[in-house]
Amino acid sequence: MLAVRRGVREWVAERGGRGPVVVGLSGGADSLALVAAAVVETAEVTAVVVDHRLQEDSGAVADRAVAHAMALGCVGAMVVPVDVGRAGGVEAAARAARYAALESVRDGRPVLLGHTLDDQAETVLLGLARGSGGRSIQGMVAWNSPWGRPLLGVRRAQTVRMCADLGIEPWHDPHNADRKYTRVRVRDEVLPLLEDVLGGGVAQALARTADQLREDGAVLDAYATELMRKARSHPAGTATLPGRPDGDTEIADPPDTLSIEILATAPPALRRRAVRAWLADQGVTGLMNAHLQAIDELVSNWHGQGGVAVAGGSRDHRLVVTREHGTLAVRAQPRI
């Protein structure tokens, strides 16, 4: 119990003091322990149970979680039903629906989530398996507004013990025992095997690795932001407007491009980070490492190859990163 309360207390202190919070409550041990600690360590707690409606008894599970929250001292508790799509798989769709529901009711308050050190270790291992670079194994952060994770230093066994000490029977999500999900197999098979082979302490070591990589990443991101600022070019240009007499021109909005010459002088790690940040500014997300490698080839190993298609665009147009006139640019091209 003390470890959970200490985790919340330290998180609150680092954020500048006590205040009202929302806690995402599933009814499981981690989120119930978080609610119990937050009631003591923050000004007031509102619990929000997102009902994904993926199981027949989900309504009863949600109602039981609300009852637990009120018994623990929350000022309020509510159930938000959601419709879970199928985009990206059930896990990803449920996660997207859950975060959207919490965002819709938080009313300016931070939202605390019950991710533990064990969740962090699983996340790092899954990121390592994807091979997408250092960013993918930086794990979860304790604060990424409006999302707070006070329990990243707390073991799952400690939240289970806290619920037992409080006399609360947590809900056991059957999805957490379904081995068709990769994360479940990492939890039940891979991590225990690593603990056995390497003599213990693996989860803590993975969490420390994530912390160190985030610190290193923050420095690299700062340098990459400066590189992006230097490489960004905003040439003044003119454009003849449709329907106006020939020669009647106005200053057009300059394109948001990056100078190839400036990018080419930078180390690849900084160059790719700068390109990723530049694309994010233009609404391009979900970049895979293969995308960044191919875009980097337009800078460092260009031999006439075409542009690189990235996520985004519309039903009729796709977004493509191209090399033109000594710059990188994002263009909308018709889908064929």
Image: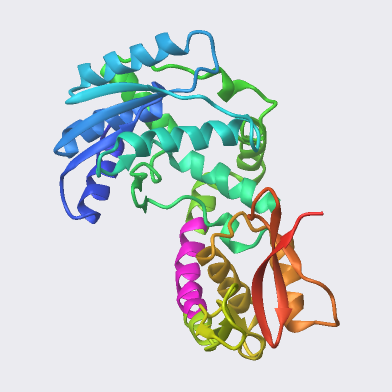
Q: Which x, y percent locates residue 113?
A: 37, 38
Figure quadrant of residue 105? top left
Left or right: 256 in relation to 33: right
| Residue 331 sits above or below residue 15 on the image | below
- Colouring chosen for the image of the structure: rainbow
Q: Which residue is depicted at the point 66% across and 55% down?
A: 311
Q: Which x, y percent locates residue 259?
A: 61, 86
Q: What stretch is highlighted in magenta?
A: 210-225
| Residue 244 sits above or below residue 25 on the image | below
Q: Which residue is depicted at the point 50% across and 68% down?
A: 217
> Is 214 part of what is drawn in magenta?
yes
Pick the front one: 169 or 313: 313
Q: Which x, y percent locates residue 157?
A: 43, 30
Q: Which residue is depicted at the point 55% across and 27% down?
A: 84
Q: Which x, y percent locates residue 63?
A: 34, 12
Pick the front one: 65 or 145: 145
Pick the front one: 185 or 296: 296
Q: Which residue is depicted at the point 39% across and 21% down?
A: 27
> Is 273 part of what is drawn in magenta?
no
